[in-house]
Image (tube, rainbow, N blue to C red):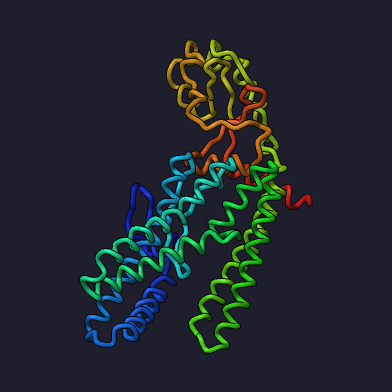
Amino acid sequence: MDSSIRLGKVFGIPLGINYSWLIVFGLVIFLMSSRFEEMYPYWPVASRWTVAILTTVLFFLSVLAHELSHSLVALAWGIPVRGITLFIFGGVSQLAHDAQRPMTEFLVSVVGPATSLALALVLGLAWYFLGSYSSYLSAVLFTLFAINLSLGIFNMLPGYPLDGGRVLRAGIWGATGNYWLATRLAIHAGQGVGILMVAGGIVWALTGNFQAIWLALVGGFLIYVATTNYRQESIRQGFRRLKTGGAVSHRWQLLPGHLTVLSQEVLMAMFVSGNTGILVDGPPYGVLTSRILNEVSTLNPASTTLYQTMVPLSVFPCVDAEAPVLDAMERMDSEKAQLLAVVEEGIPIALITKIQLLEHIRANRRSR
């Protein structure tokens, strides 16, 4: 959200507006005003612009409701949400990581279009029963009904990164058990949808409907995002073969907790581990770093044991040594952790930092 105007938080989720959205906001107000002028030529100019502004604000609140539903369901399924940003082509929920299961992917994806269609139903009923009381109210309700209906249907088109494309990926993933195959097919479907939209928008514009250029622009944006995501997922798939354990440069020594902090065994273990740290045997397991040892050396090291000075391993997020590096990084991001405990066959072997994980990735890229 660096290129966005921060608006605060909704349900604890940071909300921002990208600078590009300000251009679209003004454009939509102008288009709304022009449409109302054609439909209601007897409206005063001030009233027409007032209704256009109100309808545009409610339109973007509908987009926010769509994105907020994604975020709330993601949070309910344990996926952290970094924020929601409204931008030139709508909005996006910034999830900390993708869903880990097909059903989670399906639920997080389908709830957005479902919310838009539910809003369309409510607004359509309100227009049917209340629209006759005022042309202003009728215009606002019907326009928002049509917008939310279009938003729900459009987002269910089966092409990534649209919600329908993510639903498609969830279905293929669930049927085949192959996340990468499902991602490839969904992304190619998204590229196909984008190409059709570009072609349709250009042909439609050539017939005299110049507003169809917007359809072509959205199609081009879909092609760009789908292609970019394909490259990113290809890189991620390659890195998924990298294991977290490979980022451990020194295995920490595992020592019994009854040893004193300045015993010969402890000093030798610190030397072997490159003066990074040692592990205290459990349960419960613990950690002792060189900094902690330096702090307790001024106390009574002759009788102070490792159990008395260790930091419980449970305070650090743990990941298996065979887990992909990217999963480990996502775990650190989601828990905002500086250190990660690496476990092998149920036994901790070291603490690592994100810098070590990144160095492991860079070393692999250089070797390739």
98 vs 255, nearest the viewer: 98
From what the image shows, is residue 19 above or below residue 47? above
- Whether residue 349 sits left or right of residue 2 in the image: it is right
- Whether residue 134 sits left or right of residue 139 in the image: it is left
115 vs 214, nearest the viewer: 115
16 vs 298, nearest the viewer: 16
From what the image shows, is residue 158 above or below residue 207? above
Image point 43% across, 64% down: which residue? 149
Image point 29% across, 83% down: which residue? 40
The answer to whether one can see residue 215 in this image is yes
> Please, which residue is most extreme toward the right here?
368
Q: Position of residue 329 (x, y in %)?
A: 58, 43
- Name the image quarter holding residue 86: bottom left
Quadrant that contains the N terminus: bottom left
Q: Position of residue 195 (x, y in %)?
A: 64, 72
Image point 63% across, 16% down: which residue? 265
The answer to whether one can see residue 16 in this image is no
Q: Position of residue 187 (x, y in %)?
A: 65, 59
280 vs 44, nearest the viewer: 44
Q: How many numbered markers are drawn?
A: 0
From what the image shows, is residue 323 above or below residue 129? above
- Name the image quarter holding residue 59: bottom left
Q: Position of residue 16 (x, y in %)?
A: 39, 60
